[in-house]
């Protein structure tokens, strides 16, 4: 029996990388045993010629290439979700378009899944060569922190790149929250995952769309989506400052009893007011973050809006 692997590829401004990507995967496809590939390219509102490049590729390989195009940039998470929804294969892979996820691992991933012990074969970078050291440092700290404050496991260096069985993808799709952090969701749904280690690769062409701040925001998403420890932290700080103030009160009363009350202490008063005010605002901010996320979640807006797909284009012909 020939099995089908769907390859979900989110693309944002990837006109330069896509031809290399397709070529590389085609050479892998020919080496696969008893398996064929279905490509699902998701054009995430690219500003360049990405969609045109995809269409050009699709023209020559109508049977295997499918695509979805968003009405604007909805982000990689939305693109992944759309791709998983539209994939039809027995096995489904998610892969970046820039060849940073080595396609040559695919045959090994496939044979591991076929043994039926795992539902997912993920990949883990063991080096971070070619990445700014500051970014690597913060990434490391992030994983450490997340594993402390969340019940969900976050594997350091794990990529989104993975091959999954259909039942795992079904589970991932059933998590339909708007604020998505896929790495967490993949882990949260359970199923046994095997991680293949590999050495980091630099992107083949084009530029990364992640700045330091966008990564920072993304990690905040992860914290808020997978942990409520910051909320506990807020009440802990409140409790702590309450106890400190009680101690202080006792101290002041005793001092007044012994030495009388010379009405000094304006500076200390201001300091205390400022400190408590600051803490209150800080905690309010934490609570606000969660309320904001809840607000977005309750709107139940769709995760993405399609502009066109290979299907619509076929119908128009
Ligand atoms: N991507 C996307 N939408 C976005 C940003 C990125 O679909 O808004 C895609 C991008 O085209 C690539 C993948 O997500 O296929 C990973 O992006 P990138 O290579 O920029 O991230 P990095 O590898 O630097 O973490
Ligand atoms: Mg990349």
Image (spheres, rainbow, N blue to C red):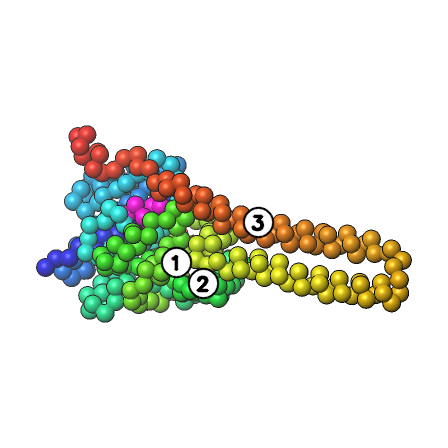
Q: Nearer the N terminus, badge 1 or badge 2?
A: 2
Which residue is painted at 87% across and 59% down in the image?
261
Which residue is painted at 35% across and 35% down in the image?
71
Helix, strand or loop under label 3: helix
Is residue 33 found left or right of 21 in the rendered image? Answer: left
Residue 150 image label: 2
C-alpha span from label 3 to label 2 = 20 Å
| Front residue of this view, candidates 90 and 282 | 282
| Front residue of this view, candidates 230 and 48 | 230
C-alpha span from label 1 to label 2 = 10 Å
Q: Determine the residue located farthest toward the left in the rendered image.
A: 1
- Please state the extent of the stretch shown in magenta in the rendering: 78-83
- Residue 138 horizontal/vertical position (percent): 52, 60
Residue, disc 3: 285
Which numbered disc, 1 or 2, marks the residue closer to the eye?
2
Packing grade of label 1 (10 A; few <14, some 14-19, many >=20) is: many
- Whether residue 136 is visible, yes or no, is no
Q: Are marks 1 and 2 in contact (CB under 8 Å)?
A: yes
Q: Nearer the N terminus, badge 1 or badge 3?
A: 1
Which residue is painted at 89% across and 62% down in the image?
260
Label 2, ligand 1: CB separation under 8 Å: no
Residue, disc 1: 184
Which residue is painted at 37% across and 49% down in the image?
177
Tally of marks:
3
Q: Name the dominant secondary structure of the magenta segment.
A: helix
Q: Nearer the N terminus, badge 3 or badge 2?
A: 2
In the rendered image of this protein, does residue 94 appear above or below residue 295? below
């Amino acid at each position: 029996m020939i099995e089908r692997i769907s390859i979900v590829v989110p693309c944002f401004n990837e006109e330069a990388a896509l031809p290399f990507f397709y070529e590389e995967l085609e050479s892998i496809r020919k080496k696969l045993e008893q398996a064929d590939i279905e490509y699902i390219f998701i054009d995430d509102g690219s500003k360049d010629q990405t969609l045109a490049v995809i269409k050009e590729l699709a023209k020559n390989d109508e049977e295997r290439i499918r695509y979805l195009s968003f009405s604007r940039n909805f982000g990689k998470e939305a693109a992944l979700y759309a791709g998983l929804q539209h994939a039809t294969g027995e096995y489904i892979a998610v892969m970046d378009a820039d060849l940073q996820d080595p396609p040559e691992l695919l045959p090994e991933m496939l044979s591991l899944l076929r043994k039926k012990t795992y539902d997912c074969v993920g990949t883990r970078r063991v080096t971070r060569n070619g990445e700014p050291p500051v970014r690597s440092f913060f990434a490391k700290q992030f994983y450490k922190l997340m594993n402390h404050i969340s019940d969900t496991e976050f594997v350091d260096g794990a990529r989104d790149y993975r091959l999954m069985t259909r039942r795992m993808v079904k589970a991932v799709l059933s998590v339909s929250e708007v604020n998505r952090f896929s790495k967490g969701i993949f882990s949260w749904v359970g199923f046994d995952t095997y991680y293949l280690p590999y050495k980091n690769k630099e992107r083949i062409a084009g530029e990364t769309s992640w700045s330091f701040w966008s990564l920072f925001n993304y990690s905040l998403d992860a914290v808020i989506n997978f942990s409520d420890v910051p909320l506990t932290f807020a009440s802990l700080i409140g409790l702590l400052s309450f106890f400190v103030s009680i101690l202080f009160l006792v101290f002041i009363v005793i001092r007044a009893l012994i030495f009388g009350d010379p009405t000094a202490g304006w500076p200390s008063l201001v300091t205390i007011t400022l400190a408590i005010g600051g803490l209150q605002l800080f905690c309010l901010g934490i609570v606000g973050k969660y309320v904001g996320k809840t607000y977005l979640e309750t709107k139940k807006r769709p995760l993405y809006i399609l502009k066109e797909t290979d299907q619509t284009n076929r119908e128009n012909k």
